[in-house]
Structures are given as C-alpha cells and as structure tokens.
Image (cartoon, helix red, strand yellow):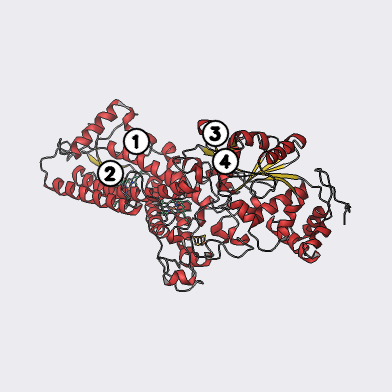
C-alpha cells in the first residue's frame, strides 16, 4: 500500500463536474416527468387545471438544460485536461488500454486481487460512459423528433424529421421510453461501482465528482 | 358574373356550363352556394376575401373530365362521396366535372365502359384528372388485381401517366393501406410508388373525407394547380396540423383527465383518450375541424381513440391501437416497456448488491493507489 507520496491531484475540472450534476438532475426530472407522460393517470378534477401541461413544460425545460449540458461536455472533451478528454472514453483503441480493461474486468469478477487504480476514469468505466453518451444522443434526438411533431413545417421538424425514416412514430416513442430504463439501469450500476472503487482504491472517487480532487501517488 | 353558355353541349373538355341553372335545378339557392364557397375557402385556409373569387371561378369553370379507378379497395371512398341523403353542393361541384369513368356508379358496363376510358386517355391526354382508389399490387407481375383483363399496374401506368393530375383518395391509394399491411402478400403499393412519373396528390384517410376531395378539386379549378403538400404528398390545408393539437378533448389532456377504462366515468364525460392508445399525437389530418358525414362527428368525437389512418403504413406503424406503446420486440406478448425496464433495474440492483456483499468480504486486495502519469 502506498502511504508515502500521496497528494491531492486536481482531476475533474469544473465543466466536468457541473455537467455531471446538471445531467444527473435533468435525468432525474426527465424520468419522473417522462414516466407521467408515458403512463398518465387522472390527477385533475377540472378541465381548467393544467397538470399534464406543466409536466410536459418541465420535461421540455429539463430537456433543453440536458441538451446544453451534454453539448458543453462534448466541447470540453476537446478543450479540457487529459482526464476530460474524449480519449478517456475509448481506451480500447490502444493495446495498453485493452490490457487494462481486461485487468479491471478480472478484478470485478473476483479473478484478480489487483485493484485497477486510475487517475482519471478506470478503463471499463470510460467505455461505459461512451455507451452512456450514445444513450444521451438517442434520448436527445428522439426527444426533439417527438417535440418537432407538433409543428411539421418548423425548423425543429426539418432537423429531426429524417429520423422518422429510421423509426415508425410508435417505434420512436418506444425507443425514447426504453432509453429511460437503460439510463436508470446504468445509474444503479454506476453509483455502486463508484462506491466500490471509492472503498477499494482509497483514492476518494466518490468525493472527487464533487470536489474535483483525487488522492494520487507521486511518480517514483 | 362570368360568361356562361346557355346551351349545354354533350361533349368536350372545354365546354362551359351554367352553374346557376344547374344549382337551381337541384334546389340549391345562390345563398347556399355562397355558403359552400365560404366553407371551401375556410377548409383551404384561404382568407374570406377569396370567397367571391372562388364563386366566380366556379361560375366560369371549363368542364374538365375525371376518371375514377378502383383497385384493391373497399369502395369506402366512393361511399364517402355518395353517402349523402340529400344532394349537397359538394356533389354538384363534382357534377361540374364530367365523370367519364367510374366503375361503381357508371351506367355503361363491359367493353363499352373500357372504351370510354380508352377514349379519355387518347383524346384528352394531359388534360383530364384521374382519381385512384385502392392500392396496386406489384408482386407476381400484378396478377392479384385485374380489371377487364388488365393488371391494375398496367391501367394505372397508362391512365395516371397521361393524366394532368392524379388524386389518390384514401390510404390504400396513397400508401398501400390495408392490403399493404405486413406481410403484404400481394406486394401492394400506393399510386405514387407504382407510377413514379405521375403528378400525384395524396388524400389519405380511411375513408378520406369527401370535403377534402371537394376542396382539392376547387383549389385546382380556382388556381389551376394542386395545393401545397407535405413530405408525404398530402395537401397542407388538410394534413398540415396534428389531430392532437385541434382535438376537442385536448383541454382534458392538458388538465390531466384521462379515460382509463372503456365506459368508465371519464369516458362518459368525454375525457382524453391518450391513455387508451389514441394516436392523435402522431397523426396529421383535419378530422377535428372538418369531421365526417356532413360535419356530424369523427372517431375521437364519438369516443374512440384515433388509429392514425391517414399515416403511411398505419396498420403496422400505429399498432397496437388500444395501447400507448407497442410491445418490445423479442419479449412475450404481456411484456410492456415498463415491465421490462423495471425488471432490468431490479436485476441490476440485485446483481450489484450481491457483488457488493461479496466485495465487502474480500480481503488481501493489493492497491498501490493511482500513480501520477506524466506522459502524453
Ligand atoms: C434522459 C433524458 C430523457 C428521459 C429519461 C425522457 C423520458 C421520457 C419518457 C419516459 C417519455 C414518455 C414516452 C412515451 O411513453 O411515449 C418522454 C416523452 C417525451 N420526451 Fe423525453 N426524456 C428525455 C429527454 C428528452 C429530450 C432531450 C427531449 C427533447 C425535447 C424530450 C422530449 C420528449 C417529448 C416531446 C415527449 C413526448 C411528449 C408528448 O407526446 O406529449 N425528452 N420522455
Ligand atoms: C443520472 C445519473 C447519472 C449519470 C447519467 C452519470 C453519468 C456519469 C458520467 C457520464 C460520468 C463521466 C463523467 C465525465 O467524464 O464527464 C460520471 C462520473 C462519475 N459519476 Fe456519475 N452519473 C450519474 C449519477 C451519479 C451519482 C448519483 C453519483 C454519486 C453518488 C455519481 C458519481 C460519479 C463519480 C464518482 C464519477 C467519477 C468516477 C469515474 O472516474 O468514473 N454519478 N457519471
Ligand atoms: S383524445 Fe387523442 S387527440 Fe384528443 S387530446 Fe387526447 S390524445 Fe390528443
């Protein structure tokens, strides 16, 4: 165990942390409102109330916040430090990266006792985030395509209408709906893995996404 | 008012006719005629100032020829046109047209009838209007639909290919419709796909709303061209807005008042049918404003969810009609997206819970801590 030479290293820059928590809040709000949009129950006793109206309004505001946040994070993948770089998401393109992914998998499967320490994302996590970003794109594209349906001559529909060549109108809704469950499944795994690595790496991953700092050993 | 000829001659596309006299014979007053012009202008989303222009154009009209072809159909569009108990002004406008061929309603039969069609195509090439009802089968050389010994495809190529314009009435003629539903045994397609070279305007709907046909024809007579269309070739005046956005039940949707079971309290009160699988949010048609049968009612007005009949491939694409979302492909028939999603979430939670317990008991892990990396 490395006791000596540990220091606090600034890993997650502000844009990484801010977009992470904006995404988290937005997804939470989008899932709750989306769940109601998907399977509404009568919650009003008079037609002059506006329950679904507000739920949809909140869904769309959160949708814009989410979209802006995701776009900002992508921008930062090119502008930020090496831990924010897009390269962190594709460790499998190098041989060394693939080796590390295997080591990490072995650790998770109780086949190895070497904790996969990483300053940035661990390699499996990085790959998973690539999939998560793909899910973000699917949610944003199908979301705006559904939103654009209300005004078929609008710019929004012109930008997203081509998606209806790939999806039937019903398939579009189903995809948007299933995407929510995939994200929820991811979050359960994600919070667990963060906790596990926090305990095992002792690098303070959990607090790092709030503070930006991780405990890192000096280069010998 | 414009010029009119007092003697009607029997033939010719260029002939003028006396509309006021025709109307008088049918017992339609000038006032009713003006009402009709106003209604059609409104349907076409023209400003009120256009009403006199529409009236004058109809007074002056030269008499174009129309032929009506029926292929793989149920004749509901013909039915929709003829259903009226009393002669309506709309019917009279269709009387302005010289309907030279219509299998269901013409007096001629057999070779005589087919000769009439051949004559129109030959003598009025590029000047007549073709109306097509029903889809056209392409599989096995088109043998699944033959009229007078010719395949539908053959007839359509000749008649629609030489027409000034072709109006596809109903979903089958527009997009293939019910005959084209999976597995589409006859290889049915709509007219535009069967005859790509033809000038086609699609008026889908199951059946189409006859008012939209009248309005399209009036537009054609008044402006000399077909109305502006959307990406599916449907006129914007009738298919430019979503059902959901014009629906009389929409206040209940926004409020959060839903029918949750057929015949429940909410259903009796006329609340929103979204929960019961209404496809109004994904369907473009003017049903809520134009309505059917002399503006009497329309499906959602009558308490049944929209099934999206004016959309391409609706039988497959809008299914299931009585549920909001389709089944997830590859899972059993009782599995909805939410059941599968919840299953996924619970499985993940349990799997990681077990992994967590196992991890808590594991000892002797080697961790050097992350090492600073300076390369790259
Ligand atoms: C992670 C992000 C998101 C989640 C979890 C989510 C969730 C959902 C869910 C579950 C539904 C109900 C679908 C159904 O059953 O038909 C829905 C509907 C919808 N969502 Fe999202 N959504 C997300 C992002 C977005 C985005 C970025 C937009 C873009 C504007 C959007 C726009 C819509 C629209 C327009 C509807 C249909 C509303 C209606 O028809 O009234 N969503 N969403
Ligand atoms: C909607 C929920 C969430 C989503 C979609 C999500 C997604 C992500 C993504 C994409 C990253 C990579 C960050 C980047 O490179 O920009 C990340 C990192 C991280 N998240 Fe989340 N997150 C969610 C919720 C949470 C929660 C609730 C926690 C903690 C309680 C958490 C803890 C962390 C930590 C510790 C990291 C950095 C760990 C690493 O190196 O991989 N996340 N998350
Ligand atoms: S009944 Fe159908 S079209 Fe009308 S508001 Fe409800 S969901 Fe929309």
- Cα distance, mark 2 to mark 3? 71 Å
Locate residue B292 relative to residue B129 in the image: left or right: left
Q: Give the structural element (helix, strand or loop) at label 1.
A: helix
Judge depth for marks 2 and 3 and give the one in front.
3
Residue for point 11% across, 44% down = B362
Q: Is B37 rendered above or below residue A127?
A: below
- Cα distance, mark 1 to mark 4? 50 Å
- Can you name the residue that lies furthest to the top here? A95
Q: Which mark is residue A88?
A: 1
Q: Give the structural element (helix, strand or loop) at label 4.
A: loop
Residue at mark 2: chain: A
Judge depth for marks 4 and 3 and give the one in front.
3
Q: Which mark is residue B190?
A: 4
Residue at mark 1: chain: A
- Cα distance, mark 4 to mark 2? 64 Å
What residue sits right under mark 3 in the picture? Answer: B142
- Cα distance, mark 4 to mark 3? 13 Å
What residue sits right under mark 2 in the picture? Answer: A214
Q: Is mark 1 within 8 Å of ligand 2?
A: yes
- Cα distance, mark 1 to mark 3? 57 Å
Q: Answer few, some or many: residues within 10 Å of disc 1's Cα (few below 14, many 20 plus, some between 14 and 19).
A: many
Q: Position of residue A135 (x, y in %)?
A: 39, 44
């Amino acid at each position: 165990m490395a006791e000596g030479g540990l220091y606090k290293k600034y890993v997650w820059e502000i844009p990484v942390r801010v977009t992470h928590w904006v995404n988290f809040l937005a997804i939470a709000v989008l899932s709750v409102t989306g769940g109601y949009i998907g399977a509404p129950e009568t919650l009003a006793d008079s037609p002059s109330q506006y329950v679904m109206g507000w739920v949809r309004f909140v869904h769309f505001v959160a949708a814009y916040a989410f979209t802006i946040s995701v776009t900002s994070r992508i921008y930062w993948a090119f502008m930020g430090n090496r831990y924010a770089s897009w390269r962190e998401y594709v460790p499998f393109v190098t041989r060394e990266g693939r080796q590390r992914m295997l080591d990490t998998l072995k650790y998770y499967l109780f086949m190895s006792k070497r904790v996969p320490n990483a300053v940035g994302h661990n390699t499996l996590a990085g790959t998973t985030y690539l999939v998560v970003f793909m899910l973000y794109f699917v949610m944003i594209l199908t979301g705006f395509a559904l939103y654009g349906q209300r005004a078929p001559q609008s710019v929004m529909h012109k930008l997203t209408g081509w998606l209806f060549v790939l999806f039937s109108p019903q398939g579009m809704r189903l995809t948007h709906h299933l995407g929510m469950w995939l994200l929820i499944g991811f979050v359960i795994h994600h919070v667990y893995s963060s906790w596990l690595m926090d305990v095992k790496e002792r690098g303070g991953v959990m607090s790092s996404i709030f503070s930006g700092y991780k405990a890192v050993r000096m280069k010998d | 008012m414009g010029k009119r000829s007092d003697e009607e001659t029997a033939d010719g596309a260029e002939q003028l006719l006396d509309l006021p006299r025709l109307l008088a014979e049918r017992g339609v007053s000038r006032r009713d005629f003006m009402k009709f012009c106003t209604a059609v202008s409104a349907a076409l989303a023209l400003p009120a100032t256009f009403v006199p222009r529409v009236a004058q154009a109809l007074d002056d009209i030269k008499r174009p020829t129309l032929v009506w072809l029926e292929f793989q159909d149920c004749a509901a569009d013909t039915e929709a046109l003829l259903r009226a108990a009393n002669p309506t002004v709309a019917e009279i406008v269709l009387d302005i047209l010289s309907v030279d061929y219509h299998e269901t309603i013409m007096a001629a039969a057999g070779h005589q009838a087919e000769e009439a069609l051949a004559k129109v195509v030959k003598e009025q090439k590029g000047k007549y209007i073709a109306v097509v009802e029903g889809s056209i089968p392409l599989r096995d050389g088109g043998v699944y639909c033959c009229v007078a010994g010719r395949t539908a495809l053959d007839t359509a190529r000749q008649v629609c290919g030489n027409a000034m314009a072709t109006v596809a009435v109903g979903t089958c003629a527009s997009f293939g419709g019910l005959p084209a539903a999976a597995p589409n045994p006859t290889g049915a397609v709509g007219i535009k796909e069967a005859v790509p070279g033809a000038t086609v305007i699609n008026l889908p709907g199951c059946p189409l709303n006859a008012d939209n046909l009248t309005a399209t024809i009036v537009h054609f007579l008044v402006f000399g061209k077909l109305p502006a269309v959307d990406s599916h070739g449907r006129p914007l005046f009738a298919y430019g807005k979503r059902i959901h956005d014009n629906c009389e039940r929409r206040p209940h949707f926004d409020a959060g008042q839903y029918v949750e079971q057929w015949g429940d309290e909410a259903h009796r009160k006329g609340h929103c049918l979204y929960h019961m699988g209404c496809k109004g949010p994904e369907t473009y048609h003017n049903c809520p404003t134009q309505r059917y049968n002399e503006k009497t009612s329309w499906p959602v007005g009558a308490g049944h969810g929209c099934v999206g009949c004016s959309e391409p491939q609706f039988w497959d694409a809008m299914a299931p009609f009585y549920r909001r979302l389709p089944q997830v492909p590859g899972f059993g028939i009782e599995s909805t997206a939410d059941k599968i999603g919840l299953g996924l979430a619970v499985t993940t939670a349990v799997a990681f819970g077990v992994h967590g317990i196992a991890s808590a008991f594991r000892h002797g892990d080697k961790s050097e801590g992350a090492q600073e990396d300076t390369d790259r």
